[in-house]
Image (cartoon, rainbow, N blue to C red):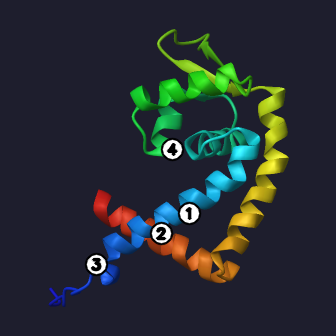
């Protein structure tokens, strides 16, 4: 194993870099999402449904790296806003299927503008963002391994 030189300053620690960057990213998303009345967790949940509608709650929770007990209140709020509908599966009563409503589907077009703004806000080139996302996925996989 290679010897690791530990950073002296918090700014040089990867955990602090990720933590502080997330706060900046979260504020930027809040600025773009608040006109739509969405929080980031609601937005990313809708994003998964835009990729593939009619998902069961446990599938959404896995995709969001979230517990179903945390996801359920979020889905209730999205349902109250008329963006999704929840219903028991016809083939398995234990499963709850989440579907987008027309109003929820209509937000997809506006989400593309948010993505474009967020890419621009980073100050990075698309290739750099792709590389960063790849490295973050690799890092997350290392922790899961």
Q: Earlier in the sequence, mark 3 or mark 1?
A: 3
Instruction: Give percent across and percent down for residue 143.
Output: 29, 62
Q: CA distance from mark 4 to mark 3?
A: 31 Å
- The foreground one among 90 and 42 is 42
Q: Which mark is residue 25?
A: 1
Q: CA distance from mark 2 to mark 4?
A: 22 Å
Q: Nearer the viewer, mark 4 or mark 1?
A: 1
Q: Quadrant of residue 11?
A: bottom left
Secondary structure state at the residue bearing disc 3: helix
Mark 2, residue position? 21
Residues 137 and 118: in front is 118
Compared with residue 30, is residue 72 higher up or lower down, i.e. above or below?
above
Mark found first going from the N terminus, 2 or 4: 2
Residue found at x 63% / y 75%: 122
Looking at the image, tell me whether mark 3 or mark 2 is earlier in sequence order. 3
Residue sitting at x 15%, y 85%: 1
Out of 30 and 136, give the one closest to the viewer: 30
| Mark drawn on residue 63 | 4
Say above or below: 2 vs 19: below
Which mark sits nearer the N-terminus, 4 or 1?
Answer: 1
Q: CA distance from mark 3 to mark 1?
A: 19 Å
| Residue at position x 67%, y 55% in the image | 31
> In the rendered image, which residue does mark 3 sit on?
10
Q: How many marks?
A: 4
Tell me whether circle 1 and circle 2 mark residues in contact (CB < 8 Å): yes
Element type at mark 1: helix
The C terminus is located in which quarter? bottom left
> Which image quadrant for residue 51?
top right
Residue 16 position within the rendered picture, expressed as x and y whole percent measured from the top left: 34, 71
Label 1 to label 2, Cα distance in Å?
6 Å
């Amino acid at each position: 194993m290679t010897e690791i030189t530990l950073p002296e300053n918090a700014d040089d620690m990867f955990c602090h870099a990720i933590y502080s960057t997330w706060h900046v990213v979260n504020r930027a998303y809040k600025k773009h999402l608040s006109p739509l009345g969405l929080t980031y967790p609601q937005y990313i949940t809708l994003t998964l449904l835009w990729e593939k509608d009619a998902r069961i709650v446990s599938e959404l929770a896995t995709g969001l790296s979230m517990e179903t007990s945390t996801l359920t209140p979020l889905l209730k709020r999205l349902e109250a806003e008329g963006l999704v509908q929840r219903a028991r599966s016809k083939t398995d009563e234990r499963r709850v299927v989440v579907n987008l409503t027309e109003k929820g589907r209509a937000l997809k077009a506006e989400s593309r503008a948010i993505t474009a703004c967020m890419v621009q806000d980073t100050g990075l080139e698309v290739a750099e963002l792709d590389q960063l996302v790849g490295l973050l996925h690799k890092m997350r996989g290392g922790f899961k391994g």
